[in-house]
Each structure stands twice: as C-alpha cells, then as structure tokens.
Image (cartoon, rainbow, N blue to C red):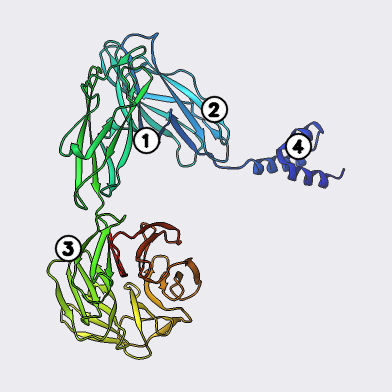
C-alpha cells in the first residue's frame, strides 16, 4: 500500500489505528503524522467540579465534614468527595501529592483513599478525607489544594471544617436543598401574591460522631416559630421523625402564605430544640414579601384606571369617574400616573394611589396615546381627531405641535429617548411612523397593517411590538421596519394595549372585546390570563420599581 494512502487512512481513523501502525514498523515520519492526528482527535478542555454528596463545592468554597471524638484514631470521621470532569478533554491531577492539606492542626486531616490522577471526560473519581482530632474539643479547619490542568480553576482549593468533640454526640445541620442554613442564617422565601402560598422543604441532618442519635426535644412542636410575623408561616411536621441517627436525616415543610398589602415584608424565627451539645436551640430566620410590582391599565368600559399585582392579584381602582379613558403612562420615580380622556379632551395625572388628581392639558380633540420623557419633563401624546402628535412640558406648561400633517388617526405612541426618536401607530392609514422628538415630518416605517393601535419598544434588542385590532394579532419587527414577525400572537378579539417587561421576558396585552389581559413571554407564549374585574381595557403600563 502506498504510504500516502496509509497516512490518509490513519488521518480518518485516528487513535484506533495507532497500535496497528506501530506493530507494522512504520517509519518515523509516518508515525509522527499519526501522533499529530491522534492528538487532534482527542483534543479538548477539561472542566473540574467537586461535590460532597449532592453539595457542590466551588473553588474557594467551604464544606463541613462533621464531628469526631478527640483522641480516637481508630474511629475517624470520614468525608467522601467526588471530582467530576465536565469538560471534553482528560482532567489531569498533577500535584504531588495529588491532594495537599494545609492546616493549623497537623495530622488531624488526612487523605484516606486518593482519587485517580487522570479523569476522562464525563467521568469522576472519589477520594476520602479522614478527620481524627486530638487534644481539646472545638472547631477545626483545613484547606485542600488540588493542582490540575483546568485552565481557569488551577489550583482548585476549598476549606473543610470539622468539630472535635470531647465525647461522642450528635451534630445538627439544617439544609434547604443543597444550601446549609447554618452557614447562611437567613432563608428568603422571595416574593409572592396574596393567595399564592410558597412551600419550602427543609431537611435536618445528624452529622455527629458515629453511632449517635439526634433527638428533637421540642414539645408540642419539634419545630417552633416566633419573631415578628409567625402567623404568615405554617409548619408541617408530618414527615419529621425523631430521633435522627448519625448519617441520616428527616424533613419538614414551611409554607409562606402572606396577607397584607403589596410590598409588605414578613419575617419569623425558626427554632429546633435538640440534643446537640452546643446547638441545642438551633435557630434561623425566614423572610418573605408580597409582590410590589403592579400592572396599571385604562379601563374604557369601567371609566377608570385599574391596577393589579404583576400576577393578577389585589385588583383595585385608584382613579374612577372618568369618561372615555384610553391610555395610561407611569412615572414611578415621582409616584405619578398620567392618562388621556377622550370624553373630557384632557391630559390628567394623579399620584399612583389615585390621590391628588389634576388637569394638565385641556381643549384637545381626541387625546389617545401617551408617553413620558421625565428627564426632560415632557409628556408626548397623540391627538387623533386633530391628526397631530403633540408635546407638553411640565415646567413651562407649553404645548409644542410636533407632527401636524399627513396623519389620519394617530393612536399609540412610544419613545426611544436615548435615540431621540418617537414611534406611533395610525389606525386610519394602517401604518407605523417614526420621527425625531422635535417638530418635523413623519417617516413611514410600515404600512398595510390592520388597525394598528398600541406600540411598545425594546430598544436594547432593537425591536418594536404592536397590536392590530383588525387582525387580532401582536406583531414584532426591527426598529427599522425589517424582519416582521406577523404571528407573534394570534387569535385575539380586539387588542388595544401592549406593555413590555424586557428584563423579566414578559409582555402584557389588553383585549377590549375579550375583556382580558394576557401575559406572554416576549416570543408570544401565553403565561396566564387576567379577567377578574376587567371591563374594556385599553392602554397599559407597568410599575416595576
């Protein structure tokens, strides 16, 4: 066989033919070619990861190994650790020794079973550390260092701690999942709505000396609650058993089911009486809060501004007695909301709770969409029966006509403040326009649309979203009008308003005829529908502060 053909075959099959070639006595040039190809075939980057049980230990992290009785060398506390290679190349543990131990307590932490020095991609190897404390009782610690060929975690170091006990005894540890609570004595349940309880399972471990049992001595409840708001939290002990033998665990559930107002914060203390000699009253704090973020919308049918929590709870009406309210915009930094009322031909505002209402602009002829540039104290709005885009300044109370020609029924308006542009829909022409935020002329972006009403921008992604009442759809395109996605959302009856929570990957759409507000992700996948108390919703805005 021609040597060039041999090289070609070896290039394809790589390492599988290296041994065959070697036994054929190939010349060095050919073997060199084979070695190069084999090296390329097996190339990849290793990625080291270390666990103790299910607990991930990051480089620089810390983990507890448990308790051992002093001066009992034949009865060590043994901790088992697993080194995983999550990369695509071989992980080489190239230290000598493979695991070095740095401690102020020499000979108390030692490697029992070492790991393999080479760990292939997708595999793991375990090692043990034996803790045999001497002398006095108390806390001990050591730093483990593992030199390796991971490009960004070499060396891999972490601290292990242990408790030297004067006598054999239990040792309590509480975890939520893989989080050890005594290393972080506050556990936060996060935010939720009234009526949407959050359940969390906690697990009690006995990591004490061998052959000991941990007794939970609280009565009548093994897990007790106190502190500021214990009534907001309930405890289920139905799965909790006592005693807990060394190396075993048992679990209980805490449910956070708050009452109150949006933004309310709650806390409680959890105490677990037990027979651990130095943690006989194991205590940690739990916290939670009611969701503060809210949705505001102009309800044409109910003649008011309504709002709910971001998940649809706690519906209320901060402003009532309106006539034909079309749109609402929020200045959350100043605690204000602004709206248009076609029935009174006014732009008005009030505090977010509806107090201190005031007129800003009167004598209009069909105010519809509204958008705010509070950095410049400017309110932008469409005056659809006057066929204009206008701007009102809050400081000098002047009105500037920005676009005065070429429009029919301008509706929704949105601002790209950093880009100095405004975008709006014209339902009379089936178009979307843009212009600079100064007096000038309108530029057509899109046409041939079916009753476009409201519009919203994601300037960070260079996207605009709009609702079409004629087609019952939500559509999306680039800010330059290219890349239209005509079927982002379909099947609506008469969509009127749209608002985005870009950071939260959420989009909220009002449907006047359907009398609903739908929550979607930004790609149009339905998350949930709000319909309790919704009349005929039009414009919508979000309080995300």
Residue at the spot of label 1: 60
Q: Is residue 479 above or below residue 523?
A: below
User: Which is more N-terminal, label 2 or label 3?
Assistant: 2
At 23% from the left edge and 47% from the top edge, which residue is drawn?
Answer: 289
Q: Secondary structure at mark 2?
A: loop
Report if the CB atoms under discs 1 and 3 are less than 8 Å apart: no
Residue at the spot of label 3: 353
Q: What separation in Å lies between label 1 and label 3 (alpha carbons)?
A: 48 Å
Residue 160: which quarter of the image? Answer: top left
Residue at the spot of label 2: 117
User: Which is more N-terminal, label 4 or label 3?
Assistant: 4
Q: List x then y, in percent, for residue 147.
A: 47, 32
Work out which quarter of the rendered image holds the C terminus and state it. bottom left
User: Which is more N-terminal, label 4 or label 2?
Assistant: 4
Disc 3 or disc 4, which is closer to the eye? Answer: 3
Q: Secondary structure at mark 1?
A: loop
At 57% from the left edge and 41% from the top edge, which residue is drawn?
Answer: 88
Q: What separation in Å lies between label 3 and label 4 (alpha carbons)?
A: 77 Å
Q: What separation in Å lies between label 2 and label 1 (alpha carbons)?
A: 21 Å
Residue at the spot of label 4: 17
Disc 3 or disc 2, which is closer to the eye? Answer: 3
- Comparing 474 with 29, the one in front is 474
Is the residue marked by circle 1 packed among few (<14), some (14-19), or many (20+) residues within 10 Å?
few
């Amino acid at each position: 066989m021609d040597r060039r053909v041999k090289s070609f075959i070896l290039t394809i099959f790589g390492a599988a033919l290296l041994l065959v070639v070697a036994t054929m006595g190939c010349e060095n040039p050919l073997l060199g070619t084979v070695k190069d190809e084999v090296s390329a075939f097996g190339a990849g980057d290793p990625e080291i990861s270390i666990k103790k049980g299910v607990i991930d230990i990051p480089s620089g992290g810390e983990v507890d190994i448990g308790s051992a009785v002093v001066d009992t060398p034949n009865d060590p506390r043994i901790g088992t650790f697993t080194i995983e290679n999550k990369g695509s190349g071989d992980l080489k543990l190239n230290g000598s020794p493979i695991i070095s131990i740095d401690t102020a307590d020499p000979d108390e932490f030692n490697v029992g079973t070492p790991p393999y020095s080479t760990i292939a991609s997708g595999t793991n190897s375990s090692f043990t550390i034996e803790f045999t404390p001497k002398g006095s009782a108390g806390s001990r610690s050591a730093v483990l260092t593992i030199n390796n060929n991971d490009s960004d975690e070499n060396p891999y170091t972490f601290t292990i701690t242990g408790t030297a006990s004067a006598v054999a005894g239990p040792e309590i540890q509480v975890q939520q999942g893989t989080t050890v609570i005594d290393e972080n004595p506050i556990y936060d349940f996060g935010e939720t709505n009234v009526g949407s309880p959050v359940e969390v399972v906690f697990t009690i471990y006995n990591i004490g000396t061998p052959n000991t049992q941990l007794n939970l001595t609280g009565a009548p409840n093994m897990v007790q609650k106190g502190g500021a708001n214990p009534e907001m939290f309930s405890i289920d002990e139905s799965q909790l058993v006592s005693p807990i033998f060394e190396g075993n665990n048992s679990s209980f559930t805490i449910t956070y089911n708050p009452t109150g107002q949006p933004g309310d914060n709650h806390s409680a203390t959890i105490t677990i009486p037990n027979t651990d000699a130095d943690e006989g009253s194991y205590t940690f704090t739990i916290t939670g809060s009611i969701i503060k973020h809210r949705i505001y919308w102009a309800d044409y049918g109910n003649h008011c501004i309504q709002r709910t929590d971001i998940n649809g709870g706690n519906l209320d009406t901060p402003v009532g007695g309106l006539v034909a309210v079309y749109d609402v915009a929020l200045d959350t930094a100043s605690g204000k909301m602004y709206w248009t009322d076609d029935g009174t031909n006014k732009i008005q505002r009030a505090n977010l709770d509806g107090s201190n209402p005031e007129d800003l602009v009167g004598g209009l002829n069909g105010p519809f969409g509204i958008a705010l540039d509070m950095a410049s104290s400017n309110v932008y709005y469409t005056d659809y029966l006057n066929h204009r885009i206008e701007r009102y300044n809050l400081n000098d109370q002047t009105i500037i006509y920005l676009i005065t020609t070429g429009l029919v029924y301008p509706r929704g308006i949105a601002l790209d403040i950093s880009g100095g542009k405004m975008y709006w829909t014209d339902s009379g022409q089936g178009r979307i326009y843009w212009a600079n935020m100064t007096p000038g002329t309108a530029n057509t972006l899109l046409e041939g649309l079916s009753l476009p009403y409201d519009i919203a921008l994601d300037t960070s992604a260079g996207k605009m979203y709009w609702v079409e009442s004629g087609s019952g759809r939500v559509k999306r395109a680039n800010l330059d009008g290219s890349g239209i996605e005509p079927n982002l959302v379909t099947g609506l009856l008469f969509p009127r308003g749209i608002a985005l929570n870009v950071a939260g990957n959420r989009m909220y759409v009002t449907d006047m005829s359907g009398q609903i507000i739908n929550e979607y992700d930004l790609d149009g996948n339905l998350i949930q529908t709000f319909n309790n108390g919704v009349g005929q919703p039009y414009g919508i805005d979000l309080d995300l502060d």
